[in-house]
Image (cartoon, coloured by chain):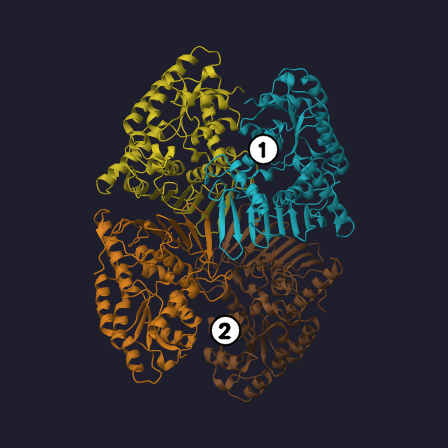
Chain colours: A cyan, B brown, C orange, D yellow
Amino acid sequence: MQRIRIGMVGGGQGSFIGGVHRIAARLDDLFELKAGVLSSDAGRNRASAAEIGIAPERAYDTVAAMLAGERGRSDAIEAVVVCTPNHLHHTAAKACLEAGLHVICDKPVTSTLEDALDLKAAVARSGRVFVLTHNYTGYPMVRQMREMVAAGAIGALRLVQSEYAQDWLTEAQETKGAKGAEWRTDPARSGAGGSIGDIGTHAYNLAAFVTGREPARLLADLTSFVPGRRLDDNAAILLRYADGAKGMIWASQVAVGNENHNTLRVYGSKGGLEWEQENPNVLGFTPYGEPRRILTRAGPAATPGNLWGSRIPSGHPEGFLEAFANIYRAAAAAIRGEADAPAYPTIADGLRGLAFIDACVRSNREGNVWVDLDAG
Amino acid sequence: MQRIRIGMVGGGQGSFIGGVHRIAARLDDLFELKAGVLSSDAGRNRASAAEIGIAPERAYDTVAAMLAGERGRSDAIEAVVVCTPNHLHHTAAKACLEAGLHVICDKPVTSTLEDALDLKAAVARSGRVFVLTHNYTGYPMVRQMREMVAAGAIGALRLVQSEYAQDWLTEAQETKGAKGAEWRTDPARSGAGGSIGDIGTHAYNLAAFVTGREPARLLADLTSFVPGRRLDDNAAILLRYADGAKGMIWASQVAVGNENHNTLRVYGSKGGLEWEQENPNVLGFTPYGEPRRILTRAGPAATPGNLWGSRIPSGHPEGFLEAFANIYRAAAAAIRGEADAPAYPTIADGLRGLAFIDACVRSNREGNVWVDLDAG
Amino acid sequence: MQRIRIGMVGGGQGSFIGGVHRIAARLDDLFELKAGVLSSDAGRNRASAAEIGIAPERAYDTVAAMLAGERGRSDAIEAVVVCTPNHLHHTAAKACLEAGLHVICDKPVTSTLEDALDLKAAVARSGRVFVLTHNYTGYPMVRQMREMVAAGAIGALRLVQSEYAQDWLTEAQETKGAKGAEWRTDPARSGAGGSIGDIGTHAYNLAAFVTGREPARLLADLTSFVPGRRLDDNAAILLRYADGAKGMIWASQVAVGNENHNTLRVYGSKGGLEWEQENPNVLGFTPYGEPRRILTRAGPAATPGNLWGSRIPSGHPEGFLEAFANIYRAAAAAIRGEADAPAYPTIADGLRGLAFIDACVRSNREGNVWVDLDAG
Amino acid sequence: MQRIRIGMVGGGQGSFIGGVHRIAARLDDLFELKAGVLSSDAGRNRASAAEIGIAPERAYDTVAAMLAGERGRSDAIEAVVVCTPNHLHHTAAKACLEAGLHVICDKPVTSTLEDALDLKAAVARSGRVFVLTHNYTGYPMVRQMREMVAAGAIGALRLVQSEYAQDWLTEAQETKGAKGAEWRTDPARSGAGGSIGDIGTHAYNLAAFVTGREPARLLADLTSFVPGRRLDDNAAILLRYADGAKGMIWASQVAVGNENHNTLRVYGSKGGLEWEQENPNVLGFTPYGEPRRILTRAGPAATPGNLWGSRIPSGHPEGFLEAFANIYRAAAAAIRGEADAPAYPTIADGLRGLAFIDACVRSNREGNVWVDLDAG
């Protein structure tokens, strides 16, 4: 099968997430990277392109230049990966969509809700595929969790406990030259959310993906523990769903000892499911009144989504990159218009993520009150 | 050394907690059980006494009868253990204090804040020792955690994440003849709190014991997921401390797969500590920027409280009963007036627990708003 | 019910295991300690007796004096606990049996196989109960494991993997004044086995208890890693059973990082069971081709032996002392002649333990060859 | 940098390991697959080539045809990946080496020791790079373990405990149409070792890689538990090193509940290190007398090899494929002649693996006696 040709916006030297996208695109041999605007700094752009094997003439200075340069080539890119800082997603993605390209975009989708709404309209007009890389939804056991909830394995959903804790912002890294810390704590580049944007949106999206529903309202308490920090580095959030289910989200970047502790537990009238990202190949499942089962990736009792997301036999751990690559696999299927393309996060999820950030900020500003979550 | 002679109020046949108190009292050979009012049912009272070796003439029908009967005996009881349903604690404990007995009382201390305030005054008048069996504070690693926080091991406290999840009330056990479920879900016998009283107070108290401080305000969202249930079976609570620290408590009795998942994680500017009750002999400690250490009961780097609370070498698990017995050890030291008696939960903690329940109920009733925690 | 009156031989001040026996005897209120020969040092004997509440006149200087002194008392001891260093078990236990007392004896039963055979005959002549405190057989999940194997849950037994690793003899503690290290590494007091006697016999006995069978042959490689040590501090042992099953035992007291890592895994044609002592309230069970189940103490799917061995609900950890006390519960039932007394380790197990040590030493001496295990 | 062009021998449709090699080769964009003899079945060969994007004219019927066809092409392959059943490794690898190609070969290197010795000579004559994919040596924490042992972190090595347990051959899969089970249990295709060849060599090699030394002698007990099976499905092995260290290896393919339980624990005079493949991003390290540290991939205290082997930040799990790809990274560095190419398993390791299998079989045949390990 032909590989899908892609260009990349952002992700040059020094970017962690750029490398992740490239590995994810390459892992299953479904994409080939042919062009890019890897950095707004021309020198770094060229150096980055050379390093990763993009031909010099296809290392463009701007998105506009890339769209112009690719137009008419027989091997022109068909899709673009956007992994710049958040505030640049909107214009890049929109321009690419309007040029007829499919878009794979990092999260959060934009830095403001307005931009996200605008982008949603652009997606709709374009008829193109828009994939948001909420990569944690790519884990096989997360797919199994979603399928089990949908199939009634835990009965009627009651509780959603979602946590995402890290510790890398325990001190003021943003004042010590750490680029990733700089833009993530800068409202101009990150938007209104700090930890809620960077990781809270993952916790929120993961819960939505697994439970198949969005909360109707939330109440948030945001904190900046590190002196001088301009965005939240910790968030405590209560959720309410229309059907009576409730939830809690805890997101923190100052919880010392947590490297990337992203865990989701859901409980219903008949069972419970518990998963944590740092040991992602297992899923705890307890039917009420029975012993807990340890379900495994590609193991006994695997659901279709678990098997779909697995490349190798059980007991051989797959990880973060494989889960990320699963989003790319789903993207490839969607771009090719396959009938049974697996679920992936879309512009709608992006909008909901922004609505989530917006709601958290509003709730917090107004004294930690309930606010509606309305994703337009 | 002479054993302290005790009487027991409540805890007859069919009571889980009565047996626990007796084992805890016996484990270190510091107490001997000599009298009791084990049940309000006269037949069960006598049968219970016979079964546990209380002389028939000291199996009294009422607390008043016990106080009268013991008065003047050379081997009269010196202290009393109160482990009735919550609403009976107040009168029993008060009468015993007024008769000059020390009191070891199960939690929550009473079923109303008013009763607790009254009892507090009674304790003060009596000059007697009043010990509240918040037994989780007896775990050696909890003692170590408290000492490490006090010694600055995690720097300035920022976050308190306290969870206590069970699943035994997932269905309406109270309608199926389960005595423990009946009174725990009955406001007349349990007070205004369901899960917040039964286990939330433990989660609250444990956090206070470890951090050495009480929150100033809280915001609570209480739920009764099981149709027909009259008290909460799930609680999500946000905490704020006067010094800027924040916290979350999750208490649930409908989280399927959680047998007795009581976990406390605290994070500060320089480190983090994580403990869970179901595997209580270890404590995770991460100094910021260093690898996590697994501290063990009586192991390397044990603090005085860890060693105090340990009977046997590391690697030989001690559990719930030993932790409970540690409260009894502390009680014995206090009753004997030892100079260096270890910390134990007191009437003040009982009052704070009631204030906690009261604040949760108020916050919830008023729409999940911040309310002050004022323990009078 | 009347408590069984016991005397104690050994276990005075400074003895870890003496305190353990006393707690275990007391935990369920089935025994009372009335007399003792707690130390061969007269002063320490008296001080120890005073400390633990034995009347001065019943703190005897020798076993003979105790037997003479107790004879004819209306409250004479009915049983004796022997917890001296190994080489003193034989004469003490034999004398007590001949005086008509039941015996609860620490392991290994004696320091030589000859002594054990002699003691076996004495038990047979006496008609008294002889209980060997292979305490790990008291764990509820070990009881469940035994019952599941017997019931065919894992099909035909194939493999036994038993490990007991510690690290407290990593350095030459015996030269640094550690009493417990001194006698355990002294052939005159411990017998021919070092780690194989102290902990290897536990690993061996636990496997036998759970599988319900003894190996026919073994091959052992013993090592003393610490320079100057006179007994083994590490043992690698291969097992063969008459029915074709095989096994491995690893016992070590120099495996740094292992506090008391005692784990047993058994595999059959249809399933596997895995248990570890440091987290003893859970048992992994995998039926072939199905997800692993996590069975818990007193939890769903608990077998009768699990429930028998449990005092409190699941999720409330019980530990080493409770397991030890279960051996005392079984002993009490046997002493009282109860019809359905639960299984406990006997003189036969003691003999098999000595035969195990003897076989290990022979196999090792002869160049790590297969030797028959013959317990006479 | 130019990608290294490779051809693949074996690994066509239905091969698990072929897919693994391709992902590993692709992950870091250092190789491109250009040609292949993917199957001895011509139809399957063509179909496999088409599926994975090899041009039809470069899907050759035989190795000889591939070598002939590639000769003289400007884009000829520079290296070959051999991942056929074991007995075909020898001739394919030798032919490729003689044609001047570098070879990346699956393990065990050949099916007989004779073949391995012959291949060793061929490697020496060729001057080409020969990489054996003992992939577990690619895990970052394994690299850290090796570096820590070399640096003296555990003092003088005493004990090596290596386990590799699976359960997929618990029943006679080889009679039920499972291709992988068929050739792995067929002496003609697998060589003299069953479980010892398939996974025992991994356990052996991993221990050698981490400790930096080979045992001098071993004693093995091999079993075929499944009726009718012609090769061992379980192995218990004792090791002795020249310097006095000792070890145990347990390899099993009938241990129900073990998916791919590959664990290595090493203990020395000053510390211990413990790692397990199913949770590969952590490494337990205990300096004697101190609390255990949990070292993490790319985390605090990471050694150069840990960092070298890591692509993404700590807390984001990397797994089996990434470790496998690390062998390919090392291979690329070696093929390019980089001065500081990281360690990788070589023909010498292959030979030692065969010597290990050979020694196991001899020891077992002769009644489980000590035999020398001599890798010629």
- Is B363 placed left or right of D364 in the picture? right
Q: Along the horizontal axis of the image, is D118 left or right of B130? A: left
Residue type highlighted by circle 1: Asp
Q: Are marks 2 and 1 on the same chain?
A: no
How many neighbours does mark 1 have within 10 angstroms: few (below 14), some (14-19), or many (20 or more)? Answer: few
Residue C14 seen from this side: no
Query: Toward the viewer: B59 or C231?
Result: B59
Dividing the picture into quadrants, the one containing residue D363 is top left
- Residue drawn 29% across and 82% down? C71
- Secondary structure of residue under mark 2: helix
Q: Nearer the viewer, mark 2 or mark 1?
A: 1
Q: Residue at x 43, y 33 (%)?
A: D135
Residue C179 position in % (x across, y down): 36, 62
* Residue D273, x across and y down, in percent: 43, 45
- Tag shown at residue B22: 2
Q: Which mark is residue A340?
A: 1
